[in-house]
Image (cartoon, helix red, strand yellow):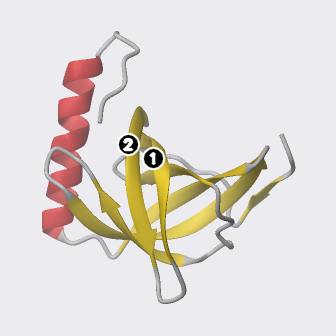
């Protein structure tokens, strides 16, 4: 694994769940797709073939139980072979988006309790 770059000190507060879902992400400079590997109430772990500079603001389209459009910002990035893993923190979360995330996380926690399985 190549060197990891972090924009902030890691301070996770939310339980993360493994996922395997293709998502789209974009901003005013690009429109790309990647793979969501983990999700929490606070953000996602994204795997992509494209480098995303630290502190880049993104619009994300997540295929949750109810599809969700939400904003995020890249907080760290790590090159692994030919791909990048990027930690995306959700930002500017509306109450409706927060409710959708909470419902999804609650559903995941009830479905995955003790199974080690992934969904999406």
Which residue is identified by label 1? 36
- At horizontal 20% and vertical 22% (from top left) the residue drawn is 110
Q: Are marks 2 and 1 in contact (CB under 8 Å)?
A: yes
Q: Secondary structure at mark 1?
A: strand
Instruction: Tell me if residue 6 comes above or below residue 53 in the rendering.
Output: above
Depth order, front residue of 1/96 = 1
- Tag 1: Cα neighbours inside 10 Å, few (<14), some, or many (≥20)? many
- At horizontal 54% and vertical 87% (from top left) the residue drawn is 29
- Tag 2: Cα neighbours inside 10 Å, few (<14), some, or many (≥20)? some
The percent coordinates of residue 86 (x first, y second) are 61, 56
Q: Quadrant of residue 80?
A: top right
Depth order, front residue of 58/93 = 58
- At horizontal 53% and vertical 51% (from top left) the residue drawn is 46
Q: CA distance from mark 2 to mark 1?
A: 5 Å
As drawn, the label of residue 107 is none
Q: Is residue 68 visible?
A: yes
As drawn, the label of residue 21 is 2
The percent coordinates of residue 37 (x first, y second) are 48, 40
Q: Is residue 15 visible?
A: no
């Amino acid at each position: 694994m190549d060197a990891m770059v972090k924009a902030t000190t890691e301070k996770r507060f939310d339980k993360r769940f493994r996922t395997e879902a293709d998502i789209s992400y974009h901003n005013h400079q690009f429109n790309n797709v990647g793979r969501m590997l983990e999700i929490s109430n606070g953000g996602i772990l994204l795997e992509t073939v494209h480098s995303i500079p630290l502190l880049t603001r993104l619009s994300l389209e997540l295929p949750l139980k109810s599809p969700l459009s939400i904003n995020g910002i890249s907080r760290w990035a790590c090159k692994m072979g030919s791909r990048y893993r990027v930690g995306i923190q959700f930002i500017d979360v509306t109450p409706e988006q927060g409710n959708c995330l909470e419902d999804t996380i609650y559903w995941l926690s009830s479905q995955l309790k003790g199974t080690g399985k992934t969904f999406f």
